Image: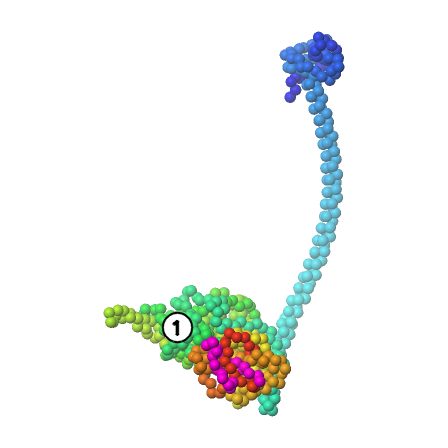
Amino acid sequence: MLGCKIWMYTFLVLPMIQNGKTQCNLKNGQCTYDMKIGHQGQCDSLTSTSLSGSGGHITGSCTCDDVSSLSNHMNAMKYTESNLKQLMADMNQYLNNATTELNSTDSKLQTEKQKGSRLTNTLNSMESQLNQTKDQLKSVLNSATSELTGLRQKLATNTRDLALCQTALGTPVSTNAAIHQDFTTFYCGFQSTDLCHFSQDHHDNTNWDRRHTEESQTGPKRDHTYGNNYGYYMALRATSPVRSSTGTTTSRLISPTFNPAPNYCVRFWYTMYGKDVKTLNVYAQVHGGLGYPVFTHTGNVDNQWHMAEISLNKEYTADMFQVVFEATHNAYHISRYSGGRYHYENHNQYGNIAVDDVYVYNTTCQNVPKYPAGSFVRTTGSKTSYYTFHGNAKTWYDAVQKCKEENIHSNLATVVDAAEQNYLVKLIQSDVSLTAAGQKGFFINGNDYDSENKYKWTASGYPESFNYTNWHVGQPNNVGDNQDCLLMQYPESNYEWGDVSCSEKHPFICETVL
């Protein structure tokens, strides 16, 4: 705010000399400023509280600096006004451009809406056509599936008949015409501590045990995968009852989740041995509900491993589901005092139930090949063997796993007589690639893992003693005290046998027996 307010009719600035100082006076109603010559534009301040005249009115302190400051403010305001005018002009131009662009965008949007409308009409038309052909396509697919299944069955039958003829003529037979596999296979032998992501049900009475040894008067002798104490299986043990009174103990083992498919096939091996054995149930659990069992067996069978097969249709498999193994026993214990202390006395304890080597295929059981593609076929009496040779060297344990993955009836080959040994040798020597792989020998099934120098065939899960051997001179010799597995080791001597470490890597021969 300026130091004085000025109202005037006429404002004059007259430079003059008065007492050598610049003065501001009111004269004849006019405000007159006196300035020193040679100092134009400079004013010394002059204080006046109130001056009046006929031409104007001055109050407060008025100096030349006030006038100069007012002039500067006026110039600044003019500059600001000029800038504002330019800004308004720019804004108008921007608004005009934006309006033009908006109109153009609106036009494009209308065009795109028209295109979208036409596309929607086209999609609706295509959807209508698709719905019209859906039933026809389903009918064609069902017909093709039925025909394909029939052709596969005919191929299997013809291949078997051909194998019988060629075997009778002494000609090695290979099923090189592979049967198409349009499905995936889940396999679990429970060798890993993660149980292939099976889990225990925490709402039952007790857990399944992962075991590898036999128990007296109940359960299997060995696991089904390896057939010796190296292998594991899952069991509900009645020999360790958790109940202290009569009643039923139930335990459930739950598989990982399987994705929807039109059909599934579930296969597994089980033993139910012991005078107190109760029930094994299998469920297809959908949305957390067990429903009725899809497999059930009650009572003692024997200590051999038996294969079970379950076919699941889309009523179970249209949604994600899990396979649940449920076993029960009636074992319990009571506490008795004798000899100065308490003892547990078990009842109904001979009721172990075991499961091993679980296979789940996302197809029908009929669609799963009975033997591996590319097998060499040999039939003797009622037994037919399908052999596959694997040049990719593996440990004995991994070779067994590979054979198991190949087929539910497969394991490393069991050579039970000289005729079978000669058959395999002839196959190897008649093929250049097999001869090359054979320079490192071929693993077969025999081993003395459980008892040194007492070799057994363990492919069935029930150890069987050798009735035929073909050891090379000086074999077996257990060098390093860790040679427990049988190798067709000496190609220069028609692959006579030797013992090697099970952890060594060699090619191997699988055998599927039907």
Q: Does any portion of residue 372 appear in the rendered image?
A: no
What residue appears at the point 55 percent right and 72 percent down from the top-left corner? 185
Q: Is residue 104 left or right of residue 309?
A: right
Measuring from the top left, give residue 457's x and y in whole percent: 48, 82
Measuring from the top left, give residue 10's x and y in whole percent: 74, 14
Question: Depth check: 376 or 333 in front?
Answer: 376
Residue type indicated by callout 1: Arg
Badge 1 marks a residue whose secondary structure is loop
Question: Depth check: 514 or 55 in front?
Answer: 514
Q: Is residue 154 left or right of residue 381?
A: right
Q: Is residue 487 magenta?
A: yes
Question: Depth check: 148 or 205 in front?
Answer: 205
Q: Which residue is mark 1?
A: 237
What residue appears at the point 59 percent right and 90 percent down from the top-left corner? 170
Q: Is 23 placed above or below 107 here?
A: above
Image quadrant in which the N terminus is located: top right
Question: Depth check: 292 or 65 in front?
Answer: 65
Q: Which residues are magenta?
A: 470-492
What residue appears at the point 56 percent right and 86 percent down from the top-left corner? 493
Measuring from the top left, give residue 138's x and y in whole percent: 62, 72
Q: Does any portion of residue 135 appear in the rendered image?
A: yes
Q: Is residue 280 left or right of residue 36?
A: left
Residue 365, quarter of picture:
bottom right
Q: How many marks?
A: 1
